Image (cartoon, rainbow, N blue to C red):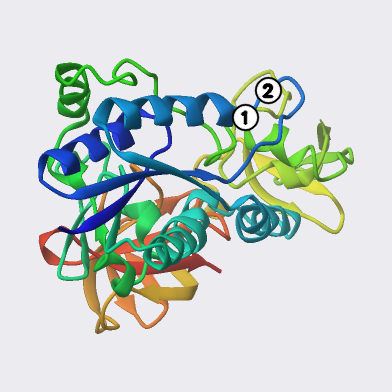
Amino acid sequence: MTRVYVGMSGGVDSSVTAALLVEQGYDVTGVYMKNWTQDLPGMKCPWADDLADAKRVAVQLGIDFKVFDFEKEYKQNVVDYMITEYKAGRTPNPDIMCNQEVKFKLFLDTALADGADMIATGHYARTKDGQLLRAKDENKDQTYFLYRVTKEALQKTLFPLGDYLKSEVRELAEERGLFTASKKESMGICFVGKVGIREFLGQYVEAVPGRIIDKQTAQTLGYHDGAIFYTIGQRHGLDIGGGLPYYVVGKDMDKNEVYVTTQLNDNSLWKQDITLHSLHWIGDTPTDGTYQIRVRHRAPLVDALLQGSSLKPAETQRAIAAGQSVVVYGDGGVCLGGGIVA
């Protein structure tokens, strides 16, 4: 019997994942990854509640349950990376890094060393022969966050929810009377809880006021509490009301200045050519040609010409920030990989 270690976060998706695998005849062990336990001002970290919920579901399903403590590695590989990127003026995605370094590397290796044959998670995605495929539920599809996972890891991974809609997963949980059936989805930073990036970064970087400058007129329109907290295309949080809305079109980290405009067609807001670095391809490196790309989670798929590390979308793309990921898709919903915007 195949032994599968399921990453159980205490949410409904991973609970249903474990239940389905039990019903499919696997030898299932639930694992809670203890990645973050630190409370932040005004926000209690939900880890203890999530752990208790995961345990309750494991008891309901009659499966073994373990806790893997990855807190040190999560801080080094995900949190420190995120802080470093923001300090450099870029816009990283901590969920992508968490999947790359923690869930599908550290968790996988630890599970295999502990006797597992495979791992499983509650991601909405599909795998086939080491390929990563988009989920049935296009609205919930999470392949954007998984594009940096290796082919070898995917060959050892099960995604039981890939063939279900989110609404169907809720129904499956209710039918089985799972403790987490009505639990709301967690939002915010992966494993940290319901906290915004600004509040989170504020614990690690000093808020230094600086000028908000109109790109067209070079006038100072107001003041911000740190250029690090702003990203290209941002409209909210500027507090410079009156008239047309302003959008962030640039920032100078050395001068701690943020540049804005009311011009929606400003060329700083739109990109016709995207250069990537830190490319990661799940299988063979794709040949130059036309593919589909996604510039952020839930962004529409658009055609783009790939030439080495350069992408030329068929339609100009709005608010592309250095540090964010662009993911490339081939025929049949196959996620080929992608890279980080230079």
Query: Do residues under tags 2 and 1 come within 8 Å of each other at their CB atoms?
Result: yes
The C terminus - image quarter: bottom right
| Residue 10, horizontal then vertical, whole percent | 42, 30
Q: Could you say where residue 114 lies in the image, as x and y percent from the top left?
A: 41, 62
Q: Position of residue 206 (x, y in %)?
A: 88, 42
Which of the two discs, 2 and 1, labels the residue nearer the N terminus? 2
Residue at x 62% of width, y 61% of height: 77
Asked whether residue 314 is in view, the answer is no
* 155 up-or-down from 265: above or below: below
Is 3 placed above or below 188 here? Answer: below
Residue pointed to by mark 2: 43
Relative to the observer, which residue lies in front, 304 or 122? 122
Is residue 249 rendered to the left or right of residue 300? right
Residue type beneath disc 2: Met
Please rate how many residues cluster around mark 1, counting C-alpha atoms within 10 Å: few if below 14, some from 14 to 19, many from 20.
some
Q: Give the residue drawn at x 42%, y 68%.
A: 113
Query: Which residue is identified by label 1?
Result: 195
Tell me the kind of residue under disc 1: Val
Find residue 283 and report its horizontal and vertical position in percent: 26, 78
Q: Secondary structure at mark 1?
A: loop
Of 197 and 16, the residue lying toward us: 16
Classify mark 2: helix, strand or loop: loop
